[in-house]
Image (cartoon, rainbow, N blue to C red):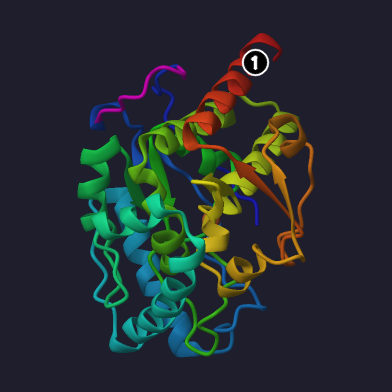
Amino acid sequence: MLSETTLSNTEPTPSLTNFEVKDEDLPEFRDMRFENINELHLDHPGASDEDYRRRRDYIASLSKNFRETGTITDVEYTEQEQTIWRTVATRLEEIQSRCASTFYLDAKRKLGISTERIPQLSEMNKRLNKLCNFRLAPIEGLVETRGFLSWLSYRTMLCTQYIRHHSRPEYTPEPDIVHEAIGHIPNFTNCDFADFSQFIGHGARIATDEQLEELGRLYWFTVEFGLVEENGELKAYGAGLLSSFGELENAFTDNVERRPFNLEQVINTPYDYSDMQPILYVIPSYAYLKETTRKYIESFNKHP
Ligand SMILES: [Fe+2]
């Protein structure tokens, strides 16, 4: 679902060396315009569950409220929601202990993300802010690519707060708090990764439509489905891998072709989000990813 997004007119000019983003540099969240991003699609496991829909709408309304007030409202998750979290987080943790990067596993601990309870965006924000000047902002649904990526240029990631339906704890067709907190958020404790994310954000703000598609592929094969080489072993750091039992197990089988990261190849490789990933790319380090992406985004200015 595409929606129109606008950022404030007073936004500062993008700069690839401007890592410091102070609160006063942020555009007004209330100026963000999103249309119909809270739609629940018919293929969602909770689509015909009225109670689930009502609860999801309520949590989404708290996220929407943030855009008016700028203050994050913590969600009082129900026992049923906590049970879904415990079930999924426990099973993922077991697979991650073998397959996830050690940096990621440490980061999860640093942020206080446990199998016991759903973490609040506000508490993770405090740590992220101190570590690499990164922040999370609640959002009530899936945002179109340019709008979503552009916020990364302010070292801000838009995150949903609701959780998947209890009938299928292993699956969600949309980003939920499991995908955000177990998949994405720990990576922002690595300053190279946070800088890399900011470069993607800068790129999204100045990209042509064609360049935006390339950026979408770069994001997919790194932020969502990236592997990293760590002490001679391949480990997962992509959120789509780390938050999915099936994808995480599959990533290390013969079903997948694991290729060394090559930016030119990555930005030209199509993907299918509806199926298991047959190709994954391995970065040698986050610092390499950051520097390669910096050069790539700088080329946007030279060849608009
Ligand atoms: Fe994601």
Would residue 163 be visible to someone looking at this image? no
Task: Give the quadrant of residue 13.
Answer: top left
Q: Residue furthest top?
A: 302
Q: Residue furthest front?
A: 232
From the viewer's side, name the closer residue of 282 and 60.
282
- Residue drawn at x 47%, y 64% as measured from the top left: 179
The residue wearing badge 1 is: 299
Q: Position of residue 156 (x, y in %)?
A: 38, 41
Q: Residues within 10 Å of mark 1 (few under 14, many from 20)?
A: few
Q: Position of residue 54 (x, y in %)?
A: 42, 81
Task: Give the quadrant of residue 120.
Answer: bottom left
Q: Which residues are magenta?
A: 14-22
Q: Position of residue 113 (x, y in %)?
A: 29, 64
Would residue 236 be visible to someone looking at this image? yes
From the viewer's side, name the closer residue of 222 and 70.
222
- Residue drawn at x 57%, y 60% as measured from the top left: 240
**Magenta span: chief secondary structure:** loop
In the rendered structure, the answer to whether residue 240 lies left or right of residue 28 reads: right
Query: Quick check: 269 above or below 240?
Result: above
The type of residue carrying mark 1 is Ser
